[in-house]
Structures are given as structure tokens and as C-alpha cells.
Amino acid sequence: MKARLDKNAIRNFLTIRYNPLEKSLFTPPTWKNFRNTESDPNGYQTEKLLKNVISNVGEKRGPFVVSLSSGIDSTLCLALLRSIFPREKIIAICGVFKEGHDESIRAREIATKFDADFKVVYMDSIFTNMPEIIYISKKPRWNTYQHMIAKEARKYGSILVTGDGADEIFGGYTFRYNKFSNLLQLKDNWRIKAINYLECHNRDWVPDQECLFGSSIKFDWDEIYNYFRPYFSNPLRPLQQVMLADFNGKLLFDFIPTGNAIFKHYGISGLQPFLHPSVVDFASHLAIEEKYDKKAQKGKLVLRKIAKRLEIQHIDEKKGFSPDLWFDWKDHGKKICQAYLLEKDSYIFRRKLINYNWVLRSFERVENDGDIRYLNRLISILALEIWYRIFLAKEMKHFTKLS
């Protein structure tokens, strides 16, 4: 597909991290799909559905490979996979960033418990390999480093199993639910709820967001808020509305298409049990109380019941494969961003997509105040410049290493 310069898409990528104007691979659910019409307090029906999905993987195509952190989603996938295929070869792969949170010690123990071979992938700087990352998704995205797991997985098998979708479907974003609940007032209308929801995603934008863009991009917060109107203007309870927005946001327009692009790029099949239509349809109708315990600040309650039966020892904290951005910035990112973003001749400035003066001020803010929100925006703007050079200017190859 030929790349084109879509200014609304750029505005959206740099404000909410995805473009909801794209065509999605899933049929977007409406509020009616999230009404409380099902119950599964002990997780038996959910477990049955997940097992059916895994059992119907089709004809054998070599060993299974599991993307394994030490959290409940991937651990549960591994445990169910082993219970269904007791003799099949399974390879578990864990990603580790330098100076980032290292889950490999616990993940190795989990892999051993379920008789899976264990491999560790040591991830490179997100800055050095940004052209490759962007080339795979065909979008100006930089936080798709899970492609390294797929790259390693294809050495061992043709099916990569991931826990994608569990957070959105079964209530894993406890920090967001808590913050949203604390902001909530009884008489809040849909617009206030949308504003509060975006406040729960405030690493994706900055307080002076309207100053970030150049003169060729028109920015209006009301246009952004209107994307979320269907999710907060309905009879659902507030946290059900949040889960509806979560599904129709980053999951639908970022995580799912990015994952599919990675599978396609490396020629492997993705097995994502939590995203199977039968699981999504059932779980989306579960009561909020079967997903999230506000008092204990615990999520994915149904999955916890299944994990307990299978004697899975997972970690409670939400970690996953993630880099230490500050370490990577100091080690690689700062000089790379300076080379591309402090040059007035860069395409993002020549095409008046980004405000050069805002970039200068943001560099100072990152250096002087250590503001992670502005660091995130600078990295996203770098990704936009790299995307432009690869797909529009066609002057950069995807295998280029930034230094």
C-alpha cells in the first residue's frame, strides 16, 4: 500500500497514539456489546472457551512459541497450551532491555514448570533500530519492540502465542480504572468523561498540545473528544465505558494491526486466544465486579481464578517487555533526536507538520525538568520524521541504524 501524507492521522498519532479514522480489522463493538448479560464467577466458561480456541489451532505446523513475560496473560497461555498439547514442543521467549525491568528470572521458572524451552532476547535501543520498527508497521510508531520476539520466534516455529487483548477484555488496567474513578463526578457528561479518560492517558499528549503542530495541521481538542463520545454517551456504568473505550482505542487501532503487521513481516502465524471472537463476545458481557476489585486494586479476576486452579505463580504488577526510556535516551536517544529534530531542514519542519520552536522548548524541558511526557512526544516526532524519510522521501532504508 502506497504511503500518503494524512495530516489528520499525524495529528491523531501524536495526540492519542493511533488513528481512529482508519478501517479496523475487528468490527468495533458498541455499548450494547458491553452490557452485563453473562456471569462466570469462577472462570470455568472462560477457561473452556480459551481451551477451545487453542485446541482448534489447526494442523500441526511445528513447535509452538510463546511470548512469555511473568504476568498472568502469557503465563496462562503457556499453561493452557501445555495442558492441551502435553507432548508438543514449546519454546518460551522473554524480552529484556538493558537497564529495563527484567522478568526473565521468573519467566524461566514458569517455562520450566510447564516443560518449555526458554530463550531470552536482549533488546537493542529503540532509537538505533527505529527505521526497522517503523518499516514493519508502516506507521510512525516507535513502541513496537515486540517485533524482536517474533524475529526470534521464527527460528523455532511458525506459531507465536501471545496474551494480547487480556487487559482490555478482562480488566487489566487497574491504574486507569482507579484514576478515572477518582476523577469521576456523579453529573459528569460524556465530554467531561472523555477529558478524564484522556487524562488517564496523559503520556500520549502534553499540556500545550496545540502548540506542538506546525501551521499545516489544524488542531482542535473538541475533534479529539468527539472520537470518544460513543463510548461515554450511553447507559453503561462508568468503568464499563472505560473498557469500551479501551477496546475501541489502542487495542483496535494500534495493538491488533501492529501485531498482525509483525506476524506478516516475519512469516509466522499469531495465536491470540484472548482476541478470539468467542472469547471477546463472552468476556465483554461479564459484570465489572468479575473483572475488577476496586478495594483490592486487582484486575482480571476471572483469569486469576483459572490461574489459581492451574497453580500458576505469576507476578501481580503490570510490567511486560518495556525499556528504561531515560537510560536509552541518555545512552542513544538524545544525540539521535538532536541530529534529526534540531535540524530545521527536516521534513517535519519543511512541510510545516511540527512547530520547530516547540521542539526546542521541549528539549530544554526534558533536560531541565526530566518531563517524561515531553520525552515521549519528542520520540514520537522522531518516529514521524523517520517514517517520512522511509515512505515518502524514500531516502532512508529500513535496515539503517541510527547513531
Image (cartoon, grey):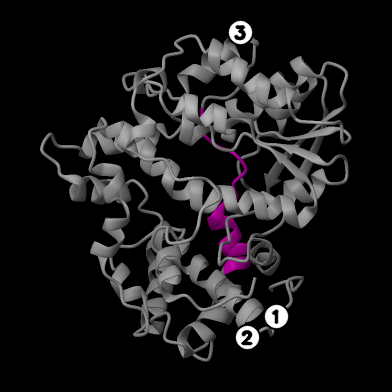
- Mark 2 and mark 3 in contact? Answer it, CB < 8 Å: no
Residue at the (37%, 84%) spot, across then down: 216
Instruction: Give percent across and percent down for residue 253.
Output: 50, 53
Residue at the (78%, 54%) spot, across then down: 266
Q: How many marks?
A: 3
Report the residue marked by disc 2. 393
Q: Is 393 a magenta residue?
A: no
Q: Amino acid at mark 3?
A: Arg
306 with respect to 114 (left or right): left
Q: CA distance from mark 2 to mark 3?
A: 55 Å
Q: Amino acid at mark 2?
A: Ala
Instruction: Give percent across and percent down for residue 192.
Output: 19, 48
Q: In terms of secondary structure, where does tag 1 sit?
A: loop
- Mark 1 and mark 3 in contact? Answer it, CB < 8 Å: no
Residue 309, numbered circle: 3
Report the residue marked by disc 1. 396
Nearest to the observer: residue 223 or residue 367: 223
- Mark 2 and mark 1 in contact? Answer it, CB < 8 Å: yes
Residue at the (68%, 62%) spot, across then down: 136
The part of the chain drawn in magenta is: 317-333
Instruction: Give percent across and percent down for residue 322.
Output: 59, 46
266 with respect to 314 (left or right): right
Q: Is 329 a magenta residue?
A: yes
Instruction: Establish if 204 lies above or below 101.
Output: below
- For the C terminus, the quadrant is bottom right
- Number of residues whose C-alpha sits closer than 10 Å to that of mark 3, classed few (under 14), some (14–19) or many (20 or more): few
Q: Is residue 310 visible?
A: yes
Instruction: Establish if 53 lies above or below 206.
Output: above
